Image (cartoon, helix red, strand yellow):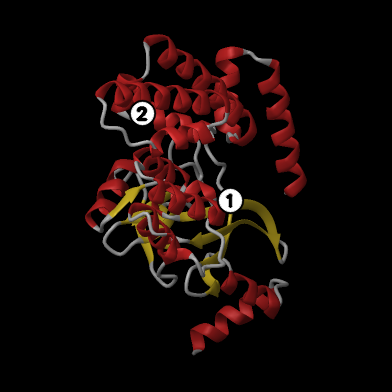
Amino acid sequence: MQKILLVLFIFLISGCSIDGLIVWGEINKVQVVKQNTYIKHYRAYFQRTHLQSIRHGKKYLYFYNKKTRDLAILLHPKNKYMLYSFSHPNTVIKIPSDRKHGYYHMIKVLKRKGYRITSPHAVGYTVKISLRRYKKVKTLLVEVKNYQYLQDVYKKAIKTYNAGKIRNIKTRLPKVLIESYYKRYKARASTEEQINQLNIIARKLHLQQSVSSKEEIIQKENTQSQTSIDTKENTTKELYSYYLNHASYYELNNYLSASESKNALSYTQYHTLKRKNSQLQEEDLLQNGSLEKLITAYKNNKDPRYKSKIMQRIKEIQKNK
């Protein structure tokens, strides 16, 4: 009790108010904002004035514990690493940082505890980070939404071609968390009923529909071998047309990463899609890339578009400070 009073006394004589003390009790802490059957929403304000780079200029990394399905964010204030759990808001892991305990030591410690580096989208989460002043303290505002349960429900419906499982769900699932999974099973659909069920699911998810002629070809079940070959060729053409003209960067990248895609496409088709993927990757970098990535790219290509985007990002950062 005497120690607490002494700390309060020091803060007061140094010009700090009780409100100031309360603020420091509110930052660097994960709080549950909203929770229902399908979504868990978390928010945290982290002090950013003393954050150091973790690796390659990054001020934060995401880690995931597969066993506990826990997403966490890693920060690097002076002399330590701090891992803040979102799924378990009271869990904070502290790891020393000095000459003997660097980046790789931290990775090993977290690996032993079940945590590995991840992307939030890869494990059913969305994250939005922005620079904010919270009661005069410079902070990183981190908004995290856990869609894992809702994602699991949709995946089960898609895998079993059963729209009934999601018919009464009103909560929106972000496309980025389900679209590639949906496309995978849509490509495998072989009956009219399966395609009808997937179309119902697609409407619920607000996903772009693929070319209808592709669906009609898939629905046709013919015992003649030549017809089967023609159907496969036409299906490949329709898939190629879709990925060339309509697919997002992430869709096309996932498609080209699949080994069966290269086997199905002709040499010209495959390399045309590879060039398209490079264009979309560049557009995605210009629209969504971090300042560090934009600067690295500009050093290599000297493209004035990157310079313009870098200046725009710097102005945004200065404005938010």
Farthest residue to the top: give it. 268
Rendered location of residue 65, percent (x, y):
31, 57
Farthest residue to the left: give it. 112
Residue drawn at 49 percent across, 40 percent down: 58
Kindly identify which numbered label has been placed on residue 206. 1
Residue drawn at 70 percent across, 42 percent down: 317
* Secondary structure found at label 1: loop
Q: Residues within 10 Å of mark 1 (few under 14, many from 20)?
A: some
Residue drawn at 63 percent across, 28 percent down: 286
How far apart, in angstroms, are the residues tagged by discs 2 and 1?
25 Å
Residue 198 in sight here = yes
Disc 2 marks a residue whose amino acid type is Ser
Q: Is residue 65 left or right of residue 62?
A: left
- In the rendered image, which quarter is residue 161 located in? bottom left
Per the image, the residue denoted by label 2 is 257
316 vs 24: above or below: above
Rendered location of residue 207, percent (x, y):
55, 46
- N-terminal label among 2 and 1: 1
Disc 1 marks a residue whose amino acid type is His
* Secondary structure found at label 2: helix
